[in-house]
Amino acid sequence: MHKVKFFIVLSTAFMMSGLAHGAEFWIRAERFTKTINGDAIPMWGFSESSDGGSSYGPPTVPGPELVVPVTETSLTIHLANLDVPERVSILIPGQRPDAMNPQIVGGRLFSLTDDVAAGNSGTYAWGVGSGSQALKPGTYLYESGSHQAVQIQMGLYGAMTHDHNTGVAYDNHPAWIAAPGAPAFLASYDESRILIFSEIDPVQHASIDTSTFTSAINYNPKYFLVNGEPYDGVLSSEIGTGWTVPGGGPKVLLRMLNAGYQTYVPVLNGRYFDIISEDGNILPFVRTQYSVELHAQKTHDAILVLGCDNAVNPSYTTTNLVLHDRRGNMSTSTPDGMLVHFTLPDGDNDFVPEFCDSCLTLPGFVDTNSDGFGNICDPDLDGSLLVNFGDFAAFVSAFFGAYNPDADFNTDGVINFGDLGTMATFFGGAPGPSGLVP
Amino acid sequence: MSVVRGQDSVRKGMEMDSLKHWVIGLTVLCGFHLSAGLAMAGIEGISGVVNGSHHTFDLEARTGYITTGEGNSVYMWGFADATGSLVGAMQYPGPTLVVTEGDLVTVNLENLLPVDTSIVFPGQNVTVVASDQAGVLTGEAPAPVKIGSEWINGNATYEFTATKPGTYTYYSGTDTGLQVEMGLLGALIVRPAANTDWAYDHVSTAFDFEYLYILSEIDDVIHDAVETNPTDPVDMSTRHTKYWLINGRTGPDTLFPSGAPYLPTQPYSSFSQTLPGKDVLLRVIGGGLDLHPFHTHGQNFRILARDGRMRSSSPTSGADIGLSDFTLTVAPGQTYDAIWNWTGAGLGWDIYDSASAHTCLGFMIETKTAGDFDPVTHEFCPDHGKPIPVDLPQNQFLAFGGFWTGSPFLGQEGALPVGEGGNNPTGGFYFMWHSHNEKELVNFDIAPGGMLTMMAVEPPGTPIP
C-alpha cells in the first residue's frame, strides 16, 4: 500500500537525568513477495518489532521508518535475519557507527561491517560507546551494508530521521545569514513527508531468489516506485491541513531519499521548494528550485512553503501539486510510476486552498457565492469589490426577507445583527483579504 | 582559477586525433556555412501575438522528421508555431518563447498527434483556461477524433503571468518520458522588465551576448516503433540512446546557422561567438531524459541561477554565491544560467603575437598589475610581449582542422597548404563545448558528432550578430 506519512513532531519525551538515553529498534530481514501490477516479485525487506524482538510485523519495502527522538544522541539497531539466504547487516551512510568490521568472503569484500546470517541476530550502534560520534540530525537511508549490488535492490533499505529540535530538522549552518523577519531556524517545518525513490528489476529479483544470479551488470529496472509503490493513478496525499493562520504559510518538509541505483529528477509543478540539505548536511544557503537531482543513495531535504501568492481562481494546479520524475521513469504496465500527487485542502472546491481562502475563520468557513472571498469577509454582495450602498440594500432585503446564504456572513444559519456588524466593519472598503491576486 | 585547459585547447585546437578526419570533411560543409555568412543571432525565438503586455502563442503538436549528422532521418513529435513561416511543420526543439517579466502569457495548443498531449511549464503558476480533457499533471489536448467526415483536433489553453525573469523550459505533461523522447520540449525565456541585457533583476547578471543550449538525446528504435504503432505503449526501460543533440541538432549540424534551409525542422544553431573580455550568458536546459556533463573549454563559467532563481545569499544580493566551474551537470527539466568570460589572463604569452607591434594600455612592455587589461583589445597586459613558449611545428608535421588559421595568435593567419583552413576567416580561438560523457560525441557510432558545438572567441572588431 502506498504509505502516506503525516508526520507530527511531538513535544520531547522526558530524559533521564545524567544519562544519554538511546533510541533502540528491533528489525528483521526476511523474504517476502511484493505484487506490483499483478507481478509477484521476490523481495527482501525489513519488519519491525515493538516488543523487543519477540514478535515482528510484516516485512515492507521500504522498511519501517526509524524515527530517533530529538532528545536521543545515540541509536541501537538489533538486526535479526529470519531467512535471507545471504548474511545481512546495517549501515547508515552519513552516520558513523561505533564499529565497522568489514567481512571478507573468498578473498572478496562481502560486507562493509559485521553481518548476520539467517537464523541469527546482531546489534549495531551509533553514538553509544565511549568515544563514539553522537548521532547527527537529519534525513538518512539505513540499508544493508552487505553485497550491496544485490541486497539493496532486493529491498533492504528504509529511512531514518532525527530532528535537531521539535519541528526543526537541523541546526543552522554556521555560515547561514538569517534574512530580516526570517524564523530562527532555517530547517523549521510544520509537517513533513518522507519520499523514498527506488526501482525494481523483476528479472534480477527472480534470479537472486532462485540463486541463479551471477551479476548486476545488466540491471534493467522495470518498476519505478515512490515509498515502495508506483503511482496508481488515484492516490494523493493532502498537505497543508490543519493550518489555522490565514494567509497561508505552512512549511512542508519534503525528505527525499533515493534508495535506488539510478538518478531521478523529481520536478514539482507550479511551485518552488527550498533545498536545505544534502546527505544529512545542512546547507549555508538554500537552493530555490522546482527540481532536485536525486542521485543514487543521495538524500535531500527541501522545504515547500505553501504560500498564497499563487492562488488564482480557477486554477488546475493550485490545489493539485504533482511531483514527477522528469527522467520519465514509468512502470512498463502503468503510466507515471514515479509520481506523487499532493492535494491542498479545498473544502469549497473553488481551487483556492483553505489556508489562502478564508478570512479569519479557519477552518469551517464557507464561500457561498464562490467569488474567492470567505463569507466572513465578504459583505460585497454585488461583487463590485467595494462594500457600499448597493450591498447594503441587498443585505437589508435578506435581513428582513428571504434567507440569502451570501448575506449570512458568520454562517450561523440566520441573518441578524451579528452579520450587520460585519457589514458595518467592511463598509466603504473592499472585501477580503483572500487568496485572490489583488 | 585554472587556465591550463585554456592553454591546452588553444594550442592543440582539437583534443582528439580522430577529430582531424572529421574536420577535413567539415571544411566542405563549412564552406557552405561560411558562404551563407556568419549570421548567428544570439537566441532565436518567438514573441507570439503581442497585445500590450499580453503574449499569445498558438502552438501545434505535430509529427515530422529531423536529420542527423551521419545522414539518418528520424520520426519526431514536436511543437510548431502555428503562425510561423514553416506552417504545417513541427520543429525540434519547440519554438523558444520570449516574453518580458510581468507579461501575461497565453499558450493555445492544438493537437495533431495520434496521441493525447499537453504542456507543463515548471516554475510558472499555470491556469488551465480550457482543455478538452483532464490529465494527471495538467489539462490535455486529446488526439484528433473523426466526427463524420471531419477530423476534430484536441485543444488546450494555458495561461500564466511571467512574474520572474529567467530561463525556463516547457515540455509535454502527458506520458512525459515517451513524449519528451519523441521531441515535445522547448524553452521559455523571460527577460527582466528594466534591463533586457540582464538575465535577472540584478546587475550581477548583466551580459554582452547570450546563447541557449538545450541538451537532449534520441533512441531511434523507439521513434521507429512509434512511427509504426503510434498508440502502443512503449517500454521505456529498453531505451538505448544513440543520438545526442544541442538545440535539436547533432554535431556538426550544431555549427550551421539558425534557420538553415537544409535543416527545416531543426531551426536553432548552437554555434557561439564572443570577444575577449565580454560576458556571455549561457542559458542551459536539460531538455531530454538523461544527465550530461556540459563542458566549456577555455574558461570557467560562473553560475548565476538554477531553475529560474538566482543563487543568492540574501534577497537583494543578486547572483553572489554561484559556483565557478568548467563542467555543468545538466539534469533533465532543470535550467541553468551562467556567465562565461574569456580573457586569456594568465596564459603566459601575448595572444596578439609578441613579434607584432602593438601596445597594451598604451605600453610597449608588460605591466605588473594583475588587473591590467587593454580597454580595446582586452589583452592581458602582464603577458604583453611574452613570446609563445613553444616552437611552433612546421606545416609538414601537422594534420589540419578547418579552424586552424596557420597562426596561434588571435586575429592572425599564417601560411597553410592549398585547400586547408577556411572555417575561421577572422582568426578566432575556437573552443569545443561538449558533453564530457565522451560516448555522447557520436551519431549512431559515427564519430565525431553528438553533443558538441563551438564557442569562438573572435578578435576585437569582429561583428557578433
Image (cartoon, coloured by chain):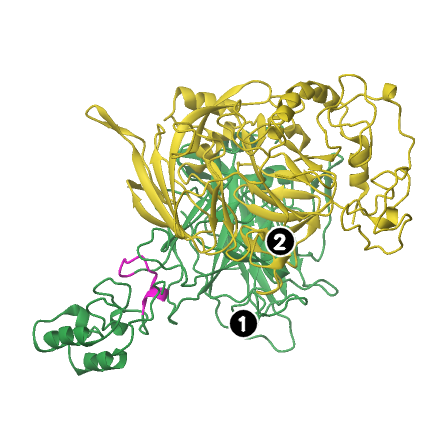
Q: CA distance from mark 2 to mark 1?
A: 32 Å
Q: Nearer the viewer, residue A297 or B70?
A: B70
Residue B188: x and y, percent? Answer: 48, 44
Residue A50 position (above or below residue B219): below
Q: In the figure, the green chain has which letter?
A: A
Residue A101 visible within the image: yes
Q: Circle 1 sits on which residue?
A: A183
**Left or right placement of residue B23 versus residue B158 in this view:** right
Residue A347 x %, y % = 28, 61
Horizontal placement of B377 versus A297: left or right?
A: right
- Judged by its main secondary structure, the magenta piece is loop
- In the image, residue B12 lies at what x, y percent? 80, 31
Please tell me the numbered disc located at residue A42: none
On the image, which quarter does residue A107 sit in? top right
Q: Is residue A312 magenta?
A: no
Q: Quadrant of residue B357?
A: top right
Q: Quadrant of the C terminus of chain A?
A: bottom left
- Which mark lies nearer to you, 2 or 1? 2
The residue wearing badge 2 is: B206
Q: Is residue B201 above or below residue B440?
A: below
Taking A305 as reference, is A218 above or below it?
Answer: above
Q: Which residues are magenta?
A: A347-358
Packing grade of label 2 (10 A; few <14, some 14-19, many >=20) is some
Q: Residues within 10 Å of mark 1 (few under 14, many from 20)?
A: few
